[in-house]
């Protein structure tokens, strides 16, 4: 509030950067873990270790491809790693089912929250000796895979409205002691590049930060794969007709608030869905090859989720079936989450997880 009062309206991207990542007051800076039953939202990692187990299968295949080309190590770089739970689940599965792969893994956990960083070694537990670095930035010369689960949707976005007078940028202003939306001139002409057609009354989020991050990831990757999971959409006239107010919303106590995301900055998660056309363009401009973008449902089915679900009525089997259903069920994580895989220096391998090739 004080920044807006003293300096005037700010872009939504600037607002999100402060609300989420300010070192003292930002949402992610003030806790080691924000998701799960006691948090504000659920991710695939919260659903079950099964998600990490299946990723281990895909990463082991990637390792075999790299090894056949002469690689002697596998850099597992988790971006937006939080306290490291996903990497722990991957390492648990790799050590059990792919011991040779496990011995070659070198883990880097990339995380901006100091609180989460401080919890990482304890979270990895018996795998702490696999941890090469805990950092706020991607390492260089990666030979392996960069994995990010629900990172891109938490990067700051600019918001543009198509009005009867043309495109205007939505900014955060103050009115009567409260933060409110207002319209201003587009802050950067680069925001207009590659925009789909919009009708008056329709809104779109544009993530400059996503484009910059993808470029950084491509530059950091010497040879290997970029594996992303996130809420995402293909921009189309039909999509904007059904989502005219965009996808920016706040999550608090497992409740989504699309109309009140300005309230209580620093106390809620802020998220916007990933524009797949913009993501592909950023990746391919950075000389990454798009291997596939499909629903998480089909990605996990192709990796054998059904084979890992136990039959029977005992509590463990019931919990596992419920977790599998959560991960792949249409209308939930299964089809709203997309698996997005890119490669550098690998050609165009037919990865197991992408066999179905289905995107809804």
Image (spheres, rainbow, N blue to C red):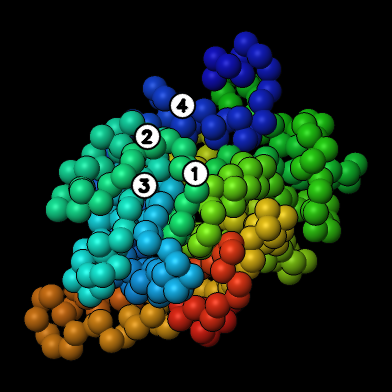
Q: Dot 1 corresponds to which residue? A: 140
In the structure shown, which secondary structural element does the residue marked by tag 4 occupy?
A: loop
Rounded to the nearest angstrom, the CA distance separating label 3 from label 4 is 23 Å
Q: Residue furthest top?
A: 6
In the structure shown, which secondary structural element does the residue marked by tag 3 occupy?
A: strand
- The earlier-in-sequence mark between 3 and 4 is 4
**Callout 3–callout 2 Cβ contact below 8 Å:** no
Image coordinates for residue 19, horizontal then vertical, percent: 49, 31
Q: Dot 4 corresponds to which residue? A: 22
Left or right: 190 as drawn, with respect to 15: right
Camera-side mark, 3 or 4: 3
Rounded to the nearest angstrom, the CA distance separating label 1 from label 2 is 21 Å
Q: Dot 2 corresponds to which residue? A: 113
Left or right: 185 as drawn, with respect to 18: right
In the structure shown, which secondary structural element does the residue marked by tag 2 occupy?
A: loop
The residue at 46%/43% (across/down) is 139
Rounded to the nearest angstrom, the CA distance separating label 2 from label 4 is 9 Å
- The earlier-in-sequence mark between 1 and 3 is 3
Rounded to the nearest angstrom, the CA distance separating label 4 from label 1 is 25 Å
Image coordinates for residue 292, horizontal then vertical, percent: 58, 73
Image coordinates for residue 83, horizontal then vertical, percent: 29, 44
């Amino acid at each position: 509030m004080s920044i807006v009062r003293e300096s005037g309206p700010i872009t939504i991207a600037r607002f999100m950067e402060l609300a989420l990542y300010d070192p003292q007051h930002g949402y992610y800076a003030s806790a080691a873990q924000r998701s799960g039953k006691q948090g504000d939202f659920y991710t695939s990692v919260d659903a079950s270790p099964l998600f990490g187990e299946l990723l281990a299968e895909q990463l082991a295949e990637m390792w075999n491809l790299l090894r056949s080309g002469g690689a002697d190590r596998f850099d597992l770089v988790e971006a937006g790693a939080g306290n490291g739970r996903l990497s722990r689940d991957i390492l648990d599965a790799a050590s059990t089912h792919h011991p040779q792969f496990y011995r070659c893994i070198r883990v880097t956990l990339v995380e901006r929250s100091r609180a989460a960083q401080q919890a990482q070694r304890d979270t990895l537990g018996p795998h702490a000796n696999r941890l090469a670095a805990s950092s706020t930035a991607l390492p260089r010369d990666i030979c392996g895979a960069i994995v990010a689960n629900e990172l891109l949707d938490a990067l700051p976005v600019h918001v543009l409205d198509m009005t009867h007078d043309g495109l205007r940028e939505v900014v955060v202003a103050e009115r009567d002691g409260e933060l409110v939306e207002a319209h201003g001139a587009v802050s950067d002409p680069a925001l207009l590049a590659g925009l789909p057609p919009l009708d008056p009354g329709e809104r779109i989020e544009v993530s400059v930060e996503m484009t910059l991050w993808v470029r950084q990831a491509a530059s950091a990757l010497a040879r290997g794969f970029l594996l992303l999971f996130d809420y995402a959409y293909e921009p189309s006239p039909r999509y904007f007709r059904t989502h005219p107010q965009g996808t920016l919303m706040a999550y608090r106590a497992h409740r989504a608030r699309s109309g009140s995301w300005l309230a209580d900055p620093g106390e809620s998660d802020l998220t916007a869905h990933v524009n797949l056309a913009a993501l592909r363009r950023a990746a391919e401009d950075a000389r990454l090859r798009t291997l596939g973008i499909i629903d998480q449902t089909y990605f996990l089915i192709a990796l054998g989720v059904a084979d890992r679900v136990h039959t029977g009525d005992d509590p463990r089997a019931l919990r596992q079936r419920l977790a599998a259903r959560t991960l792949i069920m249409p209308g939930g994580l299964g089809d709203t989450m997309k698996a997005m895989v890119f490669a550098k220096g690998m050609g165009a391998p037919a990865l197991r997880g992408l066999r179905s090739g289905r995107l809804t």
